[in-house]
Image (cartoon, rainbow, N blue to C red):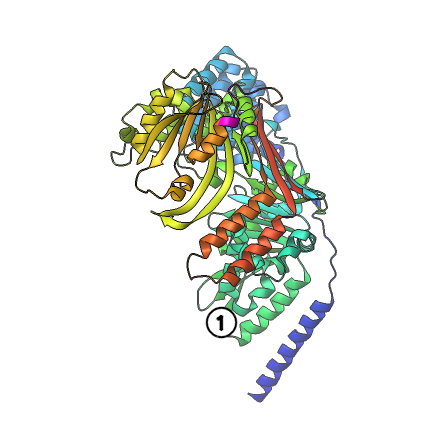
Amino acid sequence: MRRFLLIAAATLLGSIGLMAFYVMWDYDPDNVSPMVAAPSYLSIFENAVKTRMGKNWADLDPGARGRVLADIVAGRDGEPAREVALFKLRELPDKAAALAVIKKNLDRLDDERYEVAIGSIAALGTPAATGALDSLYKRLNADPAAHTPLGDYRSSSFLVSRAEPDLKFAFQERSRNDADYALTQAREISLFFPAHPQYLISIPNSDDVLKDFNDSRFARALAKSPVPEDVWRLPLLKTVASLRARLGETFGFLAPYFSPEKLFRDHFIIGRYGEEYLIASYKDKNVSLGETMLDIFGKLGKDFGIRKWDVDGTTVATVRNLKSGRTLSYATVGDYFVVGTDTAVIKTSLHTFNSDRGASIGTDPLFNKAFAGLDQTGQRDVLLAWIDPTEYFDVIGSRNPAGRHRAVVARALGRETITTDGSASSSAIAGSFPGQLGVATMGGDDPSMLWRYIVDVRSLGKNPIDSLARLAKMDIGKQIIPFLAPSMALGYGGVDHLKREYGYSNTAFNLLMAWPLRSAPPRFDSTLSLFFGRITSLVYTSEILSGNGTKLWIASDTTTNDSLLKERKLQPSFAVVNNQVLIIASTPAALRRAAAAVPSAPEVVGNNPRTYFQGQVRVDSFAVNSAAYLKAFLLQSDRYSPQVIAGRIDPIRTALAGYETLEWGFRQDNGLRHGEGRLVARK
C-alpha cells in the first residue's frame, strides 16, 4: 500500500510539473489546414458509370449514356453520383427522354438534388420542359405552405471579417447551378465533418482571434465583471455553452483543461448533427496535458472512467462520468484533435475522414468553394457559418418543402420570389421617422399570400377561440390585406419602464410601422378603426392633425384614468396619410409626431429596387436606452441587488458605447439573396 501511495504521489507531482511547463511554454505555430486530394463529385460519378457499364463516360454512345443516367438517378449510388447524373441529363440529345427521367424521379429527390433537376429541365429548353416548369410553379405557388416566412432559403454562408476598426459581415445564399463538380481538393480539416450538419461554424486561427478580442476596447470594458461568464448564455453562443456544460458533466473538476476557449487552437470548427456536436481543431499542447491528467485520474479517481476503442485504425477515448452517465469521445488524428458528444457522431466522422471522404461536407462543391476561400490566418476573416436558414429558424410550415421548391422553380423561370414593390417608398418613410434608435425596411411576399399562409398553415382563421377574423367580424383577406404594399417601414424608439405596473405590463414601447398603400378605398381608415376596435379593448376616436389635415385615429384605454399611464402605455393608434401611407404607432404621442413628419408622397429615388431588407441601429443610444430600462425593470423586485445589476449592465453599456451604428442591406439577384453589413466603431 505504501508503495502504491508513493507511485501515486510521484505521478501527481509529475503532472504538476507538466502543468508548470505548460504555463511557461506558450508556443503557437499558427497551423493552417492544407488543401489535400479529395474525391470530386465528378470522379464519384465516373466510378459509378464504370461500375455499371464497364466503360468510362466518354466512351459511351448517346443511348448508353441515357440508360446509365436513368439507372444512377433511380439507384443507390449516393448523392454525389446522383447529382452529377441529374446535371448530365441536360447534355443528352434526346431531350424528351431526359425530361421523362427527371419527372419520374423528381418527387423523391432531396432539396439539393431537386435544385439540380429543375436546373436541368430549364437547360433542356424545349416547349415541353418550359411547360412542365410553368405547371409545377403554378401548383407550388398555390400551396399556402410555399409562402412560409424563411421557408424558401437554400444553403447559405455567413462570413464575419475585419474592416479595422469595424467589423463587416456578408451573407450569401448558394445555388447548386453554380457547382463545380470537378473540384479535386479540399481543406483537410473539413473532411472530418459528414454531410448535412444542421449548421457548421468555423473560426480560423481561433486562439489568435480570441486573443485579439480579449485585447479589444470592447472586451477591456467588460474586464473584472461577471459579464464574460454570462455571455455564454446568449443565444448565439449556446452551441459552445452546451458543450461547456457537457464537459463539466463529463469531466468534473478536469473540465477546465478541456474548455473550448483553452483547449482548441488554430482552426476551430464545430458542427451540429441533431442534438450532438462534432468538433475538430489542431492538436495542441493542451491535448497532451488533458490526456495525461485523464489517464492519471481515470486510474486513481472515482468520478469517471475511460474506454478506448478503434475506428478504422484510429484510437478513440470515450470518457464517461460515473455519476451523471454523460459521455464525451475524443481522438487525435495526425495533426488534428476531434471531439464528439456522442460515440456515433465521432465514429461517423472518423470513418468519413479515413475511408469515405466523398460523404463529407468538405467535398460538397458549394461548401468546398466557400471554405477554401476563407482566410485561414484569421487576419481578415474571423468566422464562417454554413447554415440553412429554413431549417435553423424552423418556422411553422418550413418543414414542408413547397417553399424551397417554389423558390428553385421560380429561379429557373427567371422569376423573383421576393416582391420589392414599395420598397423605395418605405425607405423614404423610414428616413423621415423622428427620433428613432433604429429604422429598417422589409419587403417580401405579397401580403395576400402571407395571409393565406397565416389562415391555412397557422390555422388562425379556423380556431373559433382565437380567430382574429372572427373577432374582427370582417373578411380581413379582402377588406384590409390587398391594399398593403409588400414593403413596410419599421422604427424603434426604445422602451421605457413604467414605475407603476399597469395590468400585466409595466413596459412602454416606442414603435412605428408604416406601409405604402395600393389603391386603398376612400374609407379605408374607418375599416381599420372597426378592425382595431374589435380585436382590442381600446376605443378609437378621430382627430385632425393641425398643419396637414391628416385624420388620426387615437386609441384610448378606458380601464384607467391615470394620464401618465395612458400617455405611455401600449395603445396602437394609426393614421392614413393622403390615402397613400398607413402609419401605426404604439402610442398616440408617437403617432402625432410621425404623422407630422412622414411625407404624403414619399420620394422613390436613390433606392436599390432589389433591396428587400435594410436598416441601421444607433448602437450607443440603443445601449443607453436598454441599460436604463433593464435597471428599472430588475430593481422592481428583490431578486437582484442594485450592485449586482449595475455590475453587469454598466460594463455592457460602456463596451457598446465604443460603436456607433450597425448597418445592413439585403437584396435578391437572379433568385439568390445577398446581404452585407457593418458594425461601425466609434473613432
Quadrant (top left/top right/bottom left/bottom right) for the C terminus: top right
Measured along the vertical axis of the image, is residue 300 above or below residue 78?
below
Q: Is residue 354 visible?
A: no
Label 1 belongs to which residue?
303
Residue 566, x across and y down, in percent: 38, 40
Q: Is residue 208 left or right of residue 400?
A: right
User: Tag count in the figure?
Assistant: 1
Q: Amino acid at mark 1?
A: Asp
Q: Callout 1 environment at 10 Å: few (<14), some (14 to 19), or many (20+)?
A: some
Q: Which residues are magenta?
A: 596-604
- Tell me the quarter of the picture where residue 161 sits: top right
Q: Is residue 601 magenta?
A: yes
Residue 531, x across and y down, in percent: 33, 27
Q: Is residue 440 magenta?
A: no
Residue 464, x across and y down, in percent: 24, 33
Q: Which SS does the magenta portion mostly show? A: loop
Local secondary structure at mark 1: loop
- Tell me the quarter of the picture where residue 296 sits: bottom right
Quadrant (top left/top right/bottom left/bottom right) for the N terminus: bottom right
Q: Nearer the viewer, residue 668 or 356?
A: 668
Residue 508, x across and y down, in percent: 43, 43
Measured along the vertical axis of the image, is residue 297 above or below residue 51?
below
Which residue corresponds to the image point at 62% horizontal and 22% vertical from the top-left?
606
Which residue corresponds to the image point at 61% horizontal and 66% vertical from the top-left?
291
Q: Nearer the viewer, residue 226 or 205?
A: 226
Q: Farthest left residue? A: 464
Q: Is residue 385 visible?
A: yes
